[in-house]
Structures are given as structure tokens and as C-alpha cells.
Image (cartoon, rainbow, N blue to C red):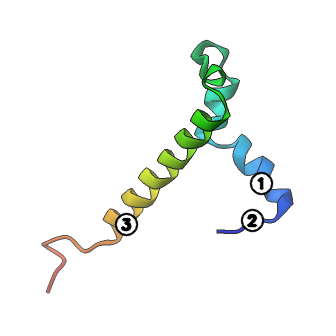
Amino acid sequence: MMYESSQILPKFLASDTAALLFDETSKFWWSGPSAIADNSRQKQARKAEAAARNAEPGPQDAS
């Protein structure tokens, strides 16, 4: 998935990862850049898995 450079910052700022970073009570920013990147990748993978599960026909849908 490629984004235009003008889309990257707004997309990140709207993410759950950014929300955690800007929430001072979470102390998430203490984790460091690699932990933050790992967290973001894990969330993206979970979203992709959920989307794939929702796209698969269930037993009642199979004909």
C-alpha cells in the first residue's frame, strides 16, 4: 500500500498509535521507536486478519 507523501502524516495522526503517543498518561512514548513501530505493525496485521475473516464465507453462506 503506497501513499502520497502528503497523506502519511494525517493518516498517522488519525491512528491508534498516534493517540497512544499523545496520551501522556500512557507513557507509550517511553517505549522507543522500535517498540512503537512494532505496535503499529501488529495493529495493522490484526486489522488485516479481521478483514480477511469477514470476507470469508461462513458455513451458512457456502452453497
Residue at image point 86% right, 58% down: 6
Residue at which label 1 appears: 8
As drawn, which residue projects farthest toward the right?
Answer: 6
Q: Is mark 3 on a helix, strand or loop?
A: helix
- Evaluate if marks 2 and 3 touch, with contact meaning CB atoms under 8 Å apart: no
Above or below, 2 against 17 in this view is: below
Residue at image point 62% right, 37% down: 34
The mark nearer the N terminus, 1 or 2, is 2
Q: Where is residue 22 in the image (x, y as percent from the top left)?
A: 70, 25
Q: Position of residue 52 (x, y in %)?
A: 37, 66
Q: In this view, does 63 lie to the left or right of 28?
A: left
Quarter holding residue 25: top right
- Evaluate if marks 1 and 2 touch, with contact meaning CB atoms under 8 Å apart: yes
The mark nearer the N terminus, 1 or 3, is 1
Residue at which label 2 appears: 3
In three-dimensional space, the C-alpha distance between marks 2 and 3, rounded to whole angstroms, equals 22 Å
